[in-house]
Image (spheres, grey):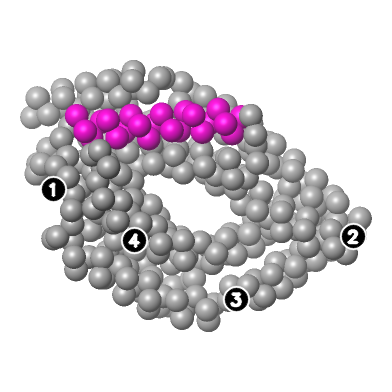
Amino acid sequence: MTYSFSLQPPVSRQIRHLVRQQVQGAIDSLNLAHGPEIVRIHEARKHLKKSRAVLALARKGRSDGVRKLDAALKQVAHKLAPFRDADSLQLVLLQLQRDYEAEHGSQLFEAARTLLEQRNLSQGLVASAFEETVPELIATLRKFLIGSDRWDLPGTTPTSLFKQIRARYGQGRARMRAAMESSDVETIHSWRKAAKDHWYHMRLLKKSWPRLIQARAIDCSTLCDFLGKDHDLGLLLEVIRNGFARDGAEEFKPLLWLMEHERTRIQAQAFSLGRLIFAEKKQALSQRLFSYWKTWRSRS
């Protein structure tokens, strides 16, 4: 089963199956003992995010069952996050070095890399620690799957489905406005989480009008890439600024400027695309998507 809704079976059963499928994908990703750590973490977190995006559509009122399931998946993702950040910051720094080493020399970047390595070591973010964490996470996810037949999921109807899609899209609009007013790392990251859910929801609906919704999903993916790069640059900027501030190293100011410059450039791209993706009011978008859904199902 692909990551999208089909005509049959009923949506509520498809939600259960899709969540199971993505959680199993997270287990399989963590189980790749010979795969690169960064790939295993990235793939596992991606499956967990997709499972939570589906699970969000099952919410009806204030379902305790859905909230408990979501909390369990969130806890696993939270334990992977520090390892993900440690790897991502190294990759961001490497890309900056590739782009600007000819202009600024290697000393800036090598000093920053040393600082990151010291930070990771002091926080226990090393490969051996990740491998020690994996069995616990896999056991948690397997326990999650074993109880899947007893999940307390409220019956999902097309009306409640699109109500949740509308609500999450509305959060994306509100968080974009907040990000435009305050471009701090956490505010933009909050927008990214809502934008990513909207991307996953478009992928789930893509069969209702493949060409149109797939094009929207591609733009959502691009937006999430912009926001992800900004988040990583923002985190790296904080780490480098805090580390070098203690030593009063004036010579590293060009590196800080480079990261601020990159954030400004990427944010401009993100806001330009985001204004298009989140241009419609939530009620209008929801009604339009629901019309595609009803037409697709009535023709089959």
- Is mark 3 in CB contact (under 8 Å) with mark 2? no
Return the x and y of residue 293 as percentages of the image width and height. 20, 27
Say whether residue 243 is left or right of residue 61: right
Question: How far, Cα to Cα, is label 1 from label 3?
Answer: 41 Å
Q: Earlier in the sequence, mark 4 or mark 1?
A: 1
Q: Amino acid at mark 1?
A: Arg
Helix, strand or loop under label 3:
loop
**Which disc number belongs to residue 124?**
3
Disc 3 versus disc 4: nearer the observer = 4
Tell me the amino acid under the disc marked 3: Gly
Residue under pointer 2: 249
The residue pinned by badge 1 equals 13
Marks 4 and 2, the one that precedes in the sequence: 4
Dot 4: few (<14), some (14–19), or many (≥20) neighbours within 10 Å?
A: few
Where disc 1 sits, the SS reads helix
Camera-nearest label, 4 or 1: 4
Which region is colored magenta?
159-180
Residue 178 seen: yes
Position of 250 with respect to 272 (left or right) is right
Alpha carbon separation for disc pair 2 and 1 = 59 Å
- Residue placed under numbered mark 4 in the picture: 72
The vertical placement of 147 against 289, above or below, is below
